[in-house]
Image (cartoon, rainbow, N blue to C red):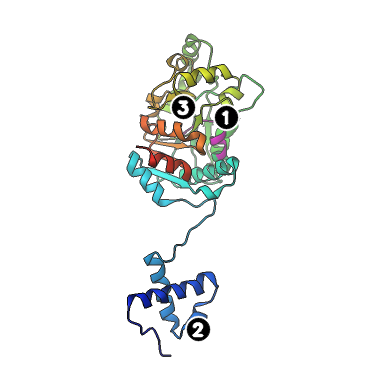
Amino acid sequence: MTETDSTGDETGHTDLLLRCAQLYYEADNTQQEIAKKLHLTRWKVGRLLAEARESGLVRIEIVHPAARQKAEEQALCERFGLRGAAVVPENAAGDEQELLSAVGRSAAQFLSDLSPVPKLLGVSWGRTMDAVARWMTPGWANGVHVVQLNGSMRVSRTPNGAPELAARIASAGAGRVSLLPVPAIVDEPTTRQALEQDSSVSGVLDLASHAGVVIFGLGALGVDSVLVESGYLSADDISGLGAAGAVGDALGRFITADGSLADPSLDERTLGVDLDVLTSIHTRIAVAAGPRKHQVVRAALRRGLCTALVTDAGTAKFLLEQP
């Protein structure tokens, strides 16, 4: 067969690339069919299609909810000094719950892909972490020890699922779990101090502080917070935290835009790993989804609370566009 790509100029060659790409990707022609139509060899068609992709004339985009946006991930790592990031595309979800599920799935995969696989893993609780736990697949680890990072015993009828969440992650990793048998927030600092002196509590807190990897959600400031739903805080408490500059919480500890504690007196009544201990742990994976989490994610990055971030493209864009 004699080839007829004899124009020799750049415009003609680009036109040929475009024609091949349109026939292949838009009209669903096979390479053999294209070769016949354009009087080319099948080998030449294959080369032209490869060139179209390499030159950027053709861009292939994966839009499955499990897909990740590598450019944004790299940019986040470079901008904020992260060791890892996973970014779920915005079009992977049609609403808030689907977005949360997509980010939870990505976080579960991110955790499963760690090398080496963690032997001692610290976990928080809440809606975000529940989404992560639901996507942990059996066999992701072999003999993992999961330890709870912050208190969770509920004080209302609204369930938070913290023990079940931690147990689900441990079970999928053929491991065991150490729970923190205390409330998230108590009425007095002296109560917290007394509880922390109990060996069943101090032992878990010490274990958590020695975890090699922790994974935790970031909570937005609002009356729909799980801390409100679980009875620890009231709407007035949330209003007061907002007035103090709080933008959300990490491990139940509310932070301002620069990552500092919004209300030290509340922090003195909060049980669990504190933020200074958190930042001493080697691998810290923060997970957050949706526009309501933008400010608290930014604050967490400013404080250096995480070494890796799993989030959505909208949040990534917000973070990268900030001065």
Q: Residue at x 49, y 85 (%)?
A: 36
Left or right of 48 in this view: 36: right
**SS of the residue at dot 3?**
strand
* Extreme-front residue of the structure: 11
Residue type at tag 1: Ala
Q: Does the magenta segment cover residue 179?
A: no
**As displayed, is residue 297 above or below residue 312?**
above
Q: Which residue is mark 1?
A: 162
Residue type at tag 3: Val
Q: Which residue is mark 2?
A: 37
Measure how far apart labels 3 and 2 are at the Cα level: 61 Å
Quarter of the picture holding the C terminus: top left
Measure how far apart labels 3 and 1 are at the Cα level: 23 Å
Marks 1 & 2, CB-CB < 8 Å contact: no
Q: Position of residue 198 (x, y in %)?
A: 49, 15
Residue 251 visible? The answer is yes
Magenta region: which residues? Answer: 122-131
Q: Nearer the viewer, residue 300 or 204?
A: 300
**SS of the residue at dot 1?**
helix
Q: Position of residue 116 (x, y in %)?
A: 40, 44
Q: Which of labels 3 and 1 is toward the front?
A: 3
**As displayed, is residue 42 above or below residue 144?**
below
Q: Does the magenta segment cover residue 127?
A: yes
- First reached walking from the N terminus: tag 3 or tag 2: 2
Q: Residue at x 49, y 34 (%)?
A: 293
Q: Nearer the viewer, residue 207 or 16?
A: 16
Q: Which mark is residue 247?
A: 3
- First reached walking from the N terminus: tag 3 or tag 1: 1
- First reached walking from the N terminus: tag 1 or tag 2: 2
